Amino acid sequence: MKKSKKYKTFRAIMLSIYLIAAIIPIYWIILTSLKVPSDLYAYPIIYFPKVLTLSNYSYLFSFAHFSIYFKNSLLLSAISSIISTLLSIFSGYALARYNFKLKDLVIGLLFFSQMIPAYLLMVPQYSMFSNLGLINSLTALGILYVNIAAAFSTIMARGFFVRIPRSLEEAAMIDGCSKIGALFRITVPLAMPGIAAIFSFSFINDWNELFTAALFLNSDDKYTIPVALYSFISKAGIQWGVLSAGLVVALIPTIIVFAFMQRFIISGLTQGALKE
């Protein structure tokens, strides 16, 4: 009993420390976004300002055209994530259910592709899309995001489909379902936690991606949020208030995605009780 109490106390202390460490940066970003300019550079540092302002948010949407960047990021991330998730369903299912020549090689190459740093591919990708006339295009960026997510999403989808018994699909086909019908009526609903996890990870990665977007986009009206936030850092200085306000706004979609997908993500990450 004493050991159990000590363990619970230790666990509570460690979780409290972790929670504080996670909350403090978010609190500081929100606080900085609400500070008046004089408080941003005050010394000693003001942790609890008496005066708060929304001027940074007003500047963000009135003069920095942040609504355009937000729309670009939202459309790009959502469409790319939906396409990569749909592709992963078919490719992951094929690798989970069918045996064919070089199957093991394909799976090995998918794993190997995750070891290649993305920076090594930027120069040939830029050259290829430049020849196609797709530089400074959100379409090109979307194709790249789908391509980047494809291997990881396929590996995850295969892992979820493998755990679903074939007998469920066979029973559905005996009742008159086609192979595609059994896939979308039986297998996909059972794998929905995993599919939701794939979509969430893909969306978050696309939403936060900076280096590829900064390389391919050079027009202000095509910027995504990460590129726009980076533009607030210049040789003249850093606009801390506006930058923090932009970070707060950028957090909203990720919070919404995790709020709606939380139970699916947790279920998907812990799924594994079923065996083929």
Image (spheres, rainbow, N blue to C red):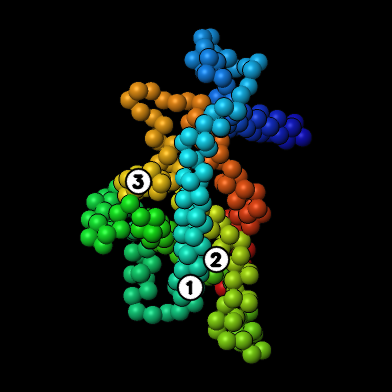
Amino acid type of the residue tagged 3 in the rendering: Ser
Q: Residues within 10 Å of mark 3 (few under 14, many from 20)?
A: few
Q: Quadrant of residue 272?
A: bottom right
Residue receiving disc 1 = 90
Judge left or right: residue 95 versus residue 191. left
Q: Residues within 10 Å of mark 2 (few under 14, many from 20)?
A: many
Q: Earlier in the sequence, mark 3 or mark 1?
A: 1
Residue receiving disc 3 = 219
At 37% from the left and 74% from the top, the residue drawn is: 103
Q: Position of residue 177 (x, y in %)?
A: 62, 86
At 47% from the left and 65% from the top, the residue drawn is: 83
Q: Quadrant of residue 233?
A: top left
Question: Between 249 and 85, which is closer to the camera in this rendering?
Answer: 249
How far, Cα to Cα, is label 3 from label 1? Answer: 36 Å
Question: Between 170 and 10, which is closer to the camera in this rendering?
Answer: 170
Q: Residues within 10 Å of mark 1 (few under 14, many from 20)?
A: some
Amino acid type of the residue tagged 2 in the rendering: Phe
Mark whose residue sits in front, 2 or 1: 1
Callout 3 secondary element: loop
Decide: marks 3, 2 in contact (CB < 8 A)?
A: no
At 35% from the left and 28% from the top, the residue drawn is: 234
At 51% from the left and 50% from the top, the residue drawn is: 71
Q: Position of residue 89 (x, y in %)?
A: 50, 69
Residue 10 visible in image: no
Residue receiving disc 2 = 160
How far, Cα to Cα, is label 2 from label 1? Answer: 12 Å
Q: Position of residue 222 (x, y in %)?
A: 40, 48
Q: Quadrant of the C terminus?
A: bottom right
